Image: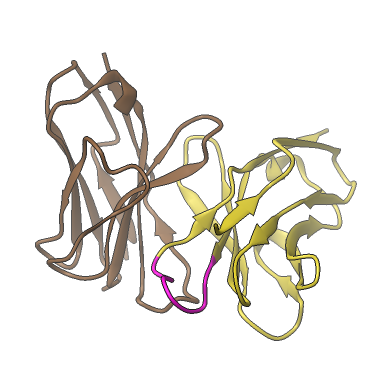
Amino acid sequence: NAGVTQTPKFRVLKTGQSMTLLCAQDMNHEYMYWYRQDPGMGLRLIHYSVGEGTTAKGEVPDGYNVSRLKKQNFLLGLESAAPSQTSVYFCASQTGLAADTQYFGPGTRLTVL
Amino acid sequence: AQSVAQPEDQVNVAEGNPLTVKCTYSVSGNPYLFWYVQYPNRGLQFLLKYITGDNLVKGSYGFEAEFNKSQTSFHLKKPSALVSDSALYFCAVRDRAGNNRKLIWGLGTSLAVNP
């Protein structure tokens, strides 16, 4: 099993450009999450999904959109990138059981110039 | 409001000495408690969790954590630190009831083990 994979690993954008980050998991997990990690701010939840076709907002959803058309994939979109979105983005997945652990992808390092 | 505190931004220990990384929480009831580790330029990896039962939980790489209900703490410990333990450590909690779809994260503690 590959676990949780993220594409791409690195990306540089110019302000105003758009892009989509892809997260894929092969563990048949119901729940999937997108986080951003910034120095000194820990992990902040952007959006999450509790099942195929569902999405919900996290702490910092502004400027991002998500879609979960297939159970194994969770896409994070930036429609018009801003320098404030320079960050490392992590995807995670888990079963629907509250006691279960979250499994993380390797991250995408995004720089917006 | 529910919250997790990791009071130390950085912990420095000498190799071979015991280490403690502190975590306290403010969550109603008896939450599920987790520790994760992040090595440089990597994603987070699960270390251990408390669900129920014995207050001392053993996890990966020789780490353990002690759940203290009265102090609402879940400190991470290791009897003898290794240089390879140097990493960023995150504590997280999840409510057992209600809105338990999300983890509440601490800000992380950077552990430096000096040779």
Q: Quadrant of the C terminus of chain B?
A: top right
Considering only vertical position in the picture, is B23 above or below A100? above
Q: Is residue B72 left or right of residue A79?
A: right
Colour of chain B in the rendered structure image: yellow
Residue A37 is situated, as x and y percent measured from the top left of the image, at 44, 37
**Most distant residue in the right direction:** B17
Q: Residue at x 84, y 38 (%)?
A: B13
Residue A61 is situated, as x and y percent measured from the top left of the image, at 28, 43
Dividing the picture into quarters, in which one does residue B9 lie? top right
- Rendered brown, the chain in question is A
Query: Is residue B96 shown in magenta?
Result: yes
Considering only vertical position in the picture, is B15 above or below B51? above
A74 or B87: nearer the viewer: A74
Q: Residue at x 81, y 51 (%)?
A: B20
Residue A49 is situated, as x and y percent measured from the top left of the image, at 25, 62
Residue B32 is situated, as x and y percent measured from the top left of the image, at 58, 72
Q: Which residues are magenta?
A: B94-101
B103 or B35: nearer the viewer: B103
**Most distant residue in the left direction:** A69
Q: How many marks?
A: 0
Q: Residue at x 76, y 77 (%)?
A: B55
A81 or B36: nearer the viewer: A81
* Dominant secondary structure (helix, strand or loop) of the stretch shown in magenta: loop
